[in-house]
Image: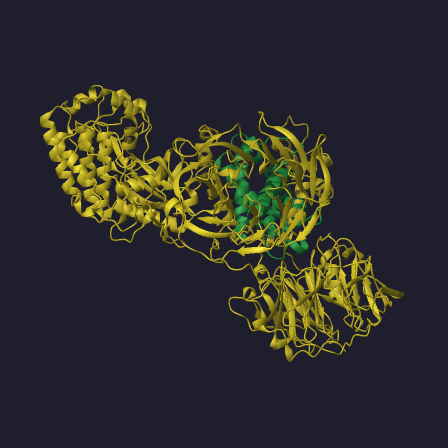
Chain colours: A green, B yellow
């Protein structure tokens, strides 16, 4: 570890650098876009929404206090839903036929809320994995990816990459360590 | 490492330690020896796989490989959005930084905010732009930001001017900006600011130009009302010299005014000192002085009697040198009039030539006029053409001959006074012919003055001058030029020559009356039928079952010519034979806002696309809609604002008079379009209580525009900047004296001083309130907000106290208080109506909505009517609140499904509140009856209604979540509800002897009967088929499909399974699977169809996946790929010859030649079709278009493929 391990969220709250914001944007944009798609927004509206959400975050993040009852995820969800609702209210974003039938306007678990469970976490993890990729030797990262995402065994990974088994375990450990540190607080 | 308790070789780590290390949970220090151990210990390696228990992160990573999410996003698009968000969220803080608290600049590290810059390399930089180091921001103008930068090669400080992100994102603006910049760059003159480079980085155009010390003439004039004659002459001459150079290149500045005349202070090195231009302390310390050897100094008159060197050493008097700014915005005189480049900063055309103000093409002499005004201002301390507002100034420009300056200020030489009169000549030809000549004359006067009287040194001025804040460049944005002639009878408005604007000439009479006459069309409210009265009129019939089912009636009588003109398409498609509902509603023209006229007589609904409709409050009839003569055009826009007296309204960039001669049928007429200022979207106007002012928010947010609308032509007055993060939902309080805005995280509340000398002025009231602005209550002190931290909670706040007190808190978003303050409507899915009592707000009743989460509502001014709109469905309802419970009055309707009767004579449409039966044997569909099921019009099923073979009874599926089916007898003179049944669906069998009932778990096939009294009865149950997969059933779409694939006549029905499996089942033989089909993509099948003989199965998927037809006669079933062009499919059917497959889609109606994977035709004009019904004649179909329209089409292609239905 070349840097003091402070999680991205902490950095953003305390003394954000441009690179931290950029990381957050890179991390969350696909998630928010995916969510926007799930509620049927067009590309344009989705991009607008993502942008609006980040505007709120840029504004609010320094004030976002750690509160065990108020996770980043639920906060992001709240901001996103609010933005979405106000956009709906304002501009009546309506894409034909998508949420009307299937979004379950009547059900409590429509796509607007369902996403924030497992899919959010999965995308977040996968995305973070991508983002930290260039911090590692290609084989180190790849070893971790194969073991965690592809679910290969240490032996399989080791064979594929021409590494020893202890080396792939160590690779996995190193990448996961960074991932955990970066994502601290995100998955709560 | 030896101190570590774990010896790497000897002792194996515990399983927990092992697993923790590999999972990356341990620190490096702790994990290092474990990994060290692993390299030597095969036993540990062996045990490790069994120890690994994935935590949430690892589970998520593993799951992500299966997640469909990854594949469904276009990565290029993601990257595009990422770079856009980076750019915008970084630069967006600029506004708040400047306008909320200046300290925000410190709070938010600068480097996070300018994404278009390359990252900083050294700590004193913000970033890099082009080849320049960006050091610090200097100034912000309307369109751009100016930074101090440094050219690292030349070690020279520069000013870097970039566009604001919101402008830079507009390619046209960027192009214009660059073009303008290139125009300036072409000019090199001592009295014109020098452009070093015109560049673009990360899509952000920028200018690198010389960094100037000093201040603008405007700043100086604000301190000193009159300037010494010596300075006047020199400044005037230098302006003229600069102009002369520009005019020589064919460039007219067009916006010569004090803020564009920079007075440069220079130091002895001829270079800007390291401290830059904005540090007055250093300048005051005497480091700043002019240089005598400057080549620009062509006359002795420039020099003060003191030798320059002495000045530098002395108290620091400097002579300022003129630099003309913003030549970039000047356009070539050979160009067509480009008013965009003019820029009426703060709406003050005080320095503008009259010909410019009237919008005709101008030449260099317009700049001379402006120079004359500047000279007048410098010598007299007054503006020659004054006025309280733009209109008055323009009037003055056109009519007033200012008092010659020597009469105002006796010190002014007569020659100068004469020159100023000449320069300000209204007739262009009477002005001096060139700037060069003017410069020459000024130089002469300077010499004469020098000889006559020694100039007076003015120490005081310098101190204050240098103490002033430097303003480098003012960015001009857009211009408004308006002029009204002397007699006030003619008003000409010239607007920005961009796409959608025009020139309007309006005849204006006394008192602002407009003589233009507009007509209004008779309100067109056709096809709005009502339920028959006397529904308690019970009719008995003894022969209800004896309808002759063979008497087939075609739709031939439906004549195109009979379709009301208003309901027609622009071109009349030959296929269209009838419209039910209104073509006006055929798109998703949802209703976003409702605004009542102050009289309460009528209200206007507006939608996102700008469609506006005027409705009578009493009759709820549509009085008028946009596009009709006299009514705002399609840019009426989202918001409309009536003046408090109700005599006019403002909408869609225009001011409209309201003619209430006939209060039931108001007429509107356009008084004038507002002169173009900025292209704004989603404009939100608020009009002052006296109707004189209009403050408007819009997109892009961050700017409130203030307009004087006292005359017929709205006149721009000024802009008020606020942090754009607050959005644009500007709301005025009931009295009109408080404004609020806030749609992101916080709400800003302002007090408005409408009568302030400089036009309406806003004063922020208190701290910004957290939350989203919902509405004002009945008075100025009551505000409703949605809490951000608890999104489902709203609060009513009392603003009288600080901090505001919470008066009432309630769940859900969306609430309004009636104007009398006694009724509160809260959106809880249903709308809860609460009355104010001593105990607080007490719920009186609830009124239903179709989909509460997307509804909005408004009280009429008298509080007696509540208008409820649901924009998902285009629904508008009115509730009469004078009764309790309130009485509902339906205004618009939507349709979910439709079905023709087997005899082809009736079409039943279902949907929300408006099930209806339509007779088709007339000239156009005639409403037989509304088949209402009460007011609980929550979404009905998409399953089409089902008729008995004799067309007498129809079963309509009810609420989608509550199993209930209603059976109506349509053969009675007044259709009657004869039974309702607690089940999900009923489908009458074509055999005429059975009915299939599906309750979500099983299908029962039963006999049925109709009693002599017309009651529907079930006979004894014959077959009960359990559905093979109960798990599927709570899913709505599956229920629909199950029914659409249910065919008793061929004993087959279809059951979708997960992962793209589709089972063809037998009804008679319980659970018998006739065939199992597998979609190759394992994707969910949402819509399917069986051919007449049950041997073909069509399966449609969503999301653009493959849609297929299986031929079951082959083994294994052979599949044929369909050419989809839409991601939505509904109600597919095969023609009776099996050759064609017809499906409703987002594209309209698609006709597939499935065997050849060919799309025969797409009938597009009905627009997106939600559903479709096939007429038994095989030629007609009815499309259901979602919110308010059903189209009946005749499709000739189908005729040869369709035999008559019904056996």
Q: Residue furthest right?
A: B1020
Q: Position of residue B332 (x, y in %)?
A: 26, 50
Q: Is residue A147 visible?
A: no
For this rendering, which residue is in front, B365 or A139?
Answer: B365
Where is residue B880 drawn, in percent x and y? 67, 47
Against B1082, is B63 above or below? above
The answer to which image quadrant residue B218 occupies is top left
Residue at (44%, 29%) from the top-left corner? B102
Identify the image quadrant of the N terminus of chain B: top right
Toward the bottom, the furthest residue is B1200
User: Where does the image place residue A133, in percent across and percent down from the top left?
Assistant: 55, 44
Counting labels gives: 0
Task: Spot the residue most to the top.
Answer: B314
Side of A130 where B281 appears, left or right:
left
Q: Which residue occupies the foreground of this view, B729 or A62?
A: B729
**Vertical arrangement, residue B1119 with respect to residue B716, above or below:** below
Q: Is residue B1051 left or right of residue B893?
A: right
Q: Is residue B488 above or below residue B959?
A: above
Dividing the picture into quadrants, the one containing residue B561 is bottom right
**Closer to us: B597 or B377:** B597
Q: Is residue B594 above or below residue B106?
A: below
The image shows residue B828 at horizontal and vertical percentages of 69, 43
Is residue B944 visible in this depiction of the protein?
yes
């Amino acid at each position: 570890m070349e840097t003091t391990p402070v999680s991205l969220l902490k950095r953003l709250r305390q003394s954000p650098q441009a690179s931290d914001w950029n990381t957050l944007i890179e991390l969350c944009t696909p998630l928010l876009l995916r969510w926007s798609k799930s509620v049927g927004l067009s590309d344009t509206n989705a991009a607008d929404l993502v942008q609006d959400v980040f505007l709120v975050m840029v504004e609010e993040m320094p004030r976002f206090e750690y509160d065990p009852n108020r996770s980043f995820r639920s906060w992001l969800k709240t901001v996103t839903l609010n933005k979405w609702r106000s956009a709906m209210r304002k501009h009546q974003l309506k894409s034909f036929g998508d949420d009307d039938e299937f979004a379950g306007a009547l059900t409590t678990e429509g796509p607007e809320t369902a996403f924030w469970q497992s899919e959010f976490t999965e995308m977040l993890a996968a995305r973070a994995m991508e983002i930290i990729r260039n911090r590692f030797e290609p084989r180190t990262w790849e070893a971790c990816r194969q073991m965690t995402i592809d679910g290969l065994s240490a032996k399989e990974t080791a064979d594929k990459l021409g590494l020893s088994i202890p080396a792939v375990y160590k690779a996995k450990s190193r990448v996961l360590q960074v991932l955990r540190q970066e994502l601290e607080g995100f998955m709560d | 490492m030896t101190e570590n308790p774990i010896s790497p070789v000897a002792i194996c780590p515990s399983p927990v330690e092992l697993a923790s290390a590999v999972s990356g949970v341990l620190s490096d220090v702790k994990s290092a020896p474990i990994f060290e151990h692993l390299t030597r210990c095969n036993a540990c390696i062996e045990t490790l796989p069994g120890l690994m228990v994935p935590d949430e992160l690892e589970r998520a990573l593993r799951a992500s490989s299966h997640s469909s999410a990854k594949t469904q996003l276009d990565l290029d698009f993601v990257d595009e959005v990422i770079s856009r968000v980076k750019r915008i969220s970084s630069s967006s803080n600029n506004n708040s930084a400047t306008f909320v608290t200046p300290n925000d600049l410190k709070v938010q590290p600068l480097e996070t905010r300018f994404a278009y810059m390359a990252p900083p390399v050294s700590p004193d930089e913000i970033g890099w732009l082009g080849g320049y180091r960006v050091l610090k921001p200097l100034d912000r103008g309307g369109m751009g930001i100016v930074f101090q930068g440094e050219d690292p090669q030349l070690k020279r400080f520069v000013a870097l001017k970039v566009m604001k992100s919101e402008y830079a994102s507009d390619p046209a603006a960027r192009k214009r900006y660059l073009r303008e910049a290139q125009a300036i760059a072409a000019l090199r003159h001592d009295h014109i600011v020098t452009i070093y480079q015109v560049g673009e980085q990360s899509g952000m155009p920028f200018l690198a130009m010389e960094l100037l010390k000093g201040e603008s003439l405007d700043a100086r004039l604000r301190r000193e009302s009159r300037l010494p004659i010596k300075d006047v002459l020199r400044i005037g001459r230098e302006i003229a010299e600069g102009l002369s150079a520009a005019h020589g290149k064919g460039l007219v500045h067009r916006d010569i005014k004090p803020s564009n005349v920079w007075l440069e202070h220079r130091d002895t090195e001829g270079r800007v000192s390291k401290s830059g231009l904005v540090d007055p302390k250093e300048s005051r310390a005497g480091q700043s002085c002019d240089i005598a050897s400057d080549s620009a100094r062509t006359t002795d008159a420039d020099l003060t009697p003191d030798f320059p060197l002495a000045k530098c050493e002395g108290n620091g008097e400097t002579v300022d040198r003129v630099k003309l700014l913003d030549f970039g915005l000047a356009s070539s005189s050979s160009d067509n009039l480009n008013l965009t480049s003019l820029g009426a900063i703060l709406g003050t055309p005080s320095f503008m030539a009259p010909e410019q103000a009237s919008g005709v093409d101008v030449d260099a002499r317009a700049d001379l006029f402006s120079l004359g005004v500047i000279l007048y201002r410098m010598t007299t301390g007054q503006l020659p053409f004054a006025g309280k507002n733009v209109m008055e100034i323009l009037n003055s420009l056109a009519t007033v001959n200012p008092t010659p300056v020597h009469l105002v200020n006796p010190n002014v030489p007569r020659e100068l006074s004469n020159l100023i009169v000449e320069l300000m000549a209204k007739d262009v030809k009477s002005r001096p012919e060139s700037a060069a000549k003017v410069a020459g004359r000024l130089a002469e006067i300077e010499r004469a003055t020098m000889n006559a009287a020694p100039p007076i040194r003015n120490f005081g001025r310098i101190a204050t001058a240098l103490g002033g804040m430097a303003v480098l460049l003012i960015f001009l944005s857009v211009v408004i030029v308006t002029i009204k002639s002397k007699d006030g009878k003619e008003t000409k408005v010239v607007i920005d020559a961009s796409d959608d604007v025009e020139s309007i000439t309006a005849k204006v009479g006394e008192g602002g009356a407009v003589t233009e006459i507009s007509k209004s069309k008779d309100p067109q409210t056709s096809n709005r039928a009502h339920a028959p009265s006397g529904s308690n009129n019970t009719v008995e019939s003894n022969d209800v079952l004896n309808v002759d089912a063979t008497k087939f009636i075609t739709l031939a009588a439906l004549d195109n010519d009979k379709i009301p003109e208003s309901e027609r398409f622009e071109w009349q498609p030959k296929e269209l034979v009838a419209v039910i509902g209104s073509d006006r509603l055929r798109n998703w023209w949802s209703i976003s806002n409702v605004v009542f006229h102050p009289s309460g007589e009528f209200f206007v609904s507006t939608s996102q696309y700008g469609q506006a409709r005027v409705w009578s409050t009493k009759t709820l009839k549509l009085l008028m809609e946009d596009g009709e003569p006299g009514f705002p055009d399609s840019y009426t826009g989202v918001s409309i604002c009536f003046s408090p007296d109700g005599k006019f309204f403002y909408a869609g960039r225009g001011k409209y008079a309201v003619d209430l001669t006939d209060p039931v049928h108001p007429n509107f007429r356009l008084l004038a379009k507002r002169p173009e200022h900025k292209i704004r979207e989603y404009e939100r106007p608020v009009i002052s209580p006296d109707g004189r002012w209009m403050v408007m928010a819009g997109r892009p947010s961050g700017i409130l525009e203030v307009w004087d609308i006292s005359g017929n032509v709205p006149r721009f007055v000024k802009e008020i900047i606020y942090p754009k993060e607050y959005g644009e939902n500007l709301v005025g309080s009931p009295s009109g004296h408080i404004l609020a805005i806030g749609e992101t995280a916080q709400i800003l509340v302002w007090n408005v001083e409408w009568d302030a000398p400089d036009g309406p002025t806003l004063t922020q009231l208190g701290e910004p309130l957290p939350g989203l602005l919902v509405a004002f209550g009945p008075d100025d002190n009551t505000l409703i907000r949605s809490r951000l931290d608890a999104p489902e909670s709203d609060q009513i706040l009392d603003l009288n106290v600080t901090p505001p007190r919470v008066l009432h808190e309630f769940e859900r978003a969306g609430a309004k208080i009636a104007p009398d303050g006694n009724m509160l409507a809260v959106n809880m899915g249903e709308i809860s109506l609460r009355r104010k009592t001593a105990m607080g707000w007490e719920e009186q009743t609830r009124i239903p909505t179709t989909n509460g989460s997307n509804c909005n509502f408004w009280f009429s001014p008298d509080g007696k009517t509540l208008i409820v709109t649901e924009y998902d469905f285009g629904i508008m309802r009115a509730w009469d609140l004078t009764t309790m419970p309130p009485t509902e009055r339906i205004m618009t309707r939507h349709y979910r499904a439709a079905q023709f009767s087997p005899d082809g004579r009736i079409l039943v449409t279902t949907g929300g509140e408006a099930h209806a039966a339509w007779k088709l044997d007339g000239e156009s569909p005639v409403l037989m009856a509304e088949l209402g099921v009460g007011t609980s019009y929550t979404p009905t099923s998409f399953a089409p209604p089902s008729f008995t073979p004799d067309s007498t009874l129809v079963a309509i599926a009810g609420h989608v979540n509550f199993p209930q089916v209603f059976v109506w007898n349509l053969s009675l003179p007044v259709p009657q509800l004869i039974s309702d049944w607690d089940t999900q669906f009923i489908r009458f069998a074509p055999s005429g002897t059975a009915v299939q009932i599906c309750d979500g778990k099983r299908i029962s096939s039963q006999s049925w009967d109709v009693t002599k009294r017309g009651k529907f009865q079930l006979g004894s149950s014959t077959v009960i088929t359990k559905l093979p997969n109960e798990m599927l059933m709570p899913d709505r779409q599956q229920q629909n499909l199950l029914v659409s694939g249910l065919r008793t006549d061929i004993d087959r029905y279809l059951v979708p399974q997960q992962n793209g499996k589709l089972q063809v089942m037998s009804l008679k033989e319980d659970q018998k699977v006739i065939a199992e089909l597998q979609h190759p993509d394992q994707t969910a099948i949402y819509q399917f169809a069986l051919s007449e003989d049950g041997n073909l199965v069509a399966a449609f998927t969503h999301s653009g996946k493959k849609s297929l037809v299986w031929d079951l006669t082959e083994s294994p079933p052979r599949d044929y790929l369909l050419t989809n062009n839409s991601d939505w499919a509904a109600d597919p059917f095969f023609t009776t010859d099996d050759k064609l497959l017809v499906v409703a889609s987002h594209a309209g109606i698609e006709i597939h030649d499935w065997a050849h994977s060919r799309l025969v035709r797409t009938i597009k004009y009905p627009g997106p079709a939600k559903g479709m019904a096939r007429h038994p004649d095989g030629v007609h179909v009815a499309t259901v278009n979602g919110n308010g329209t059903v189209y009946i089409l005749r499709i000739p292609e189908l005729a040869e493929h369709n035999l008559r239905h019904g056996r």
